Image (cartoon, rainbow, N blue to C red):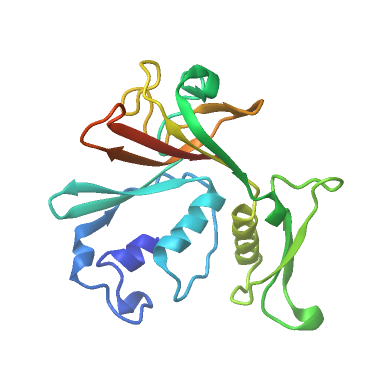
Amino acid sequence: ALVTRNATTSGTTADGRDRNVDAWGAFVSVAADTAAGTSQTVACMGENLFEVLQGIANAGGLDFSLVKTAARAWQFRTSALLGTDRSASVTFALQYGNMRRPSLRSNRRSEKTAVTAGGQGVDTGRAVRTRTGTNYDATVNSYELFLNASQYTTDAGLDSAADERLEELRARDSLSFDVIQVPSTLYGLHYFLGDKVSAYLLGFAYTPQIRRVMVNVSAGGAMPETLQVTAADV
């Protein structure tokens, strides 16, 4: 709905916009709704469309893409997972000879697991909703945050805002490494961008999604092609 009303010619002042979407909106279409993900109520006046979509996708359990379908045509699509779950067949580890220069980062110091969202109103008349994340544990992992969400008037809106913030602040282990192209794990043959794979480092096992791939190609040398992969827990 957000893409339709803000990035296609369906976005007009008749729908509440301050101005019509320009002519370029005719080049963008939206694929049929598959009713995947979770239902969310979002208030995002004046915010960047791409950033809003990222927040919705993270909280709703979806990926999205803008696919070129013709010379001057792109289609916005959503899917439960951009890629395929290949964690049973594709594994990266130092001992397998297909990983080098690994770097593991974690944002657990800024993690929050419970959010109290305050909507419109004042004092005891203010709408308040409390939500907990999937990583919440009342004994060992309870970190609370207050969220000012005064743009919302409904419980559904406050719940969505709190869930989105919880997903944003959920601790994730981000593992980046340079890929060594070996016959058993070749990018573009055995795995692709968006796939879920397995990775082992320092005795820990991960099943991250391939989020970013950078390819550097040089004119010569022992390793003319270098791949760097960034994978993060989903």
Q: Residue at x 69, y 49 (%)?
A: 108
Q: Is residue 187 above or below residue 27?
A: above
Quadrant where the image shows the N terminus: bottom left
Closer to us: 129 or 199: 199
Whether residue 168 sits left or right of residue 17 in the image: it is right
Whether residue 211 sits left or right of residue 166 in the image: it is left
Q: In this view, does 100 lie above or below 142?
A: above
Q: Residue at x 80, y 52 (%)?
A: 142
Closer to us: 156 or 94: 94
Q: How many labels does the image show?
A: 0
Q: Where is residue 51 in the image (x, y as percent from the top left)?
A: 45, 62
Q: In this view, does 112 lie above or below 230?
A: below
Whether residue 201 sits left or right of residue 97 in the image: it is right
Q: Residue at x 63, y 69 (%)?
A: 154
Q: Position of residue 97 (x, y in %)?
A: 47, 20
Quadrant where the image shows the C terminus: top right
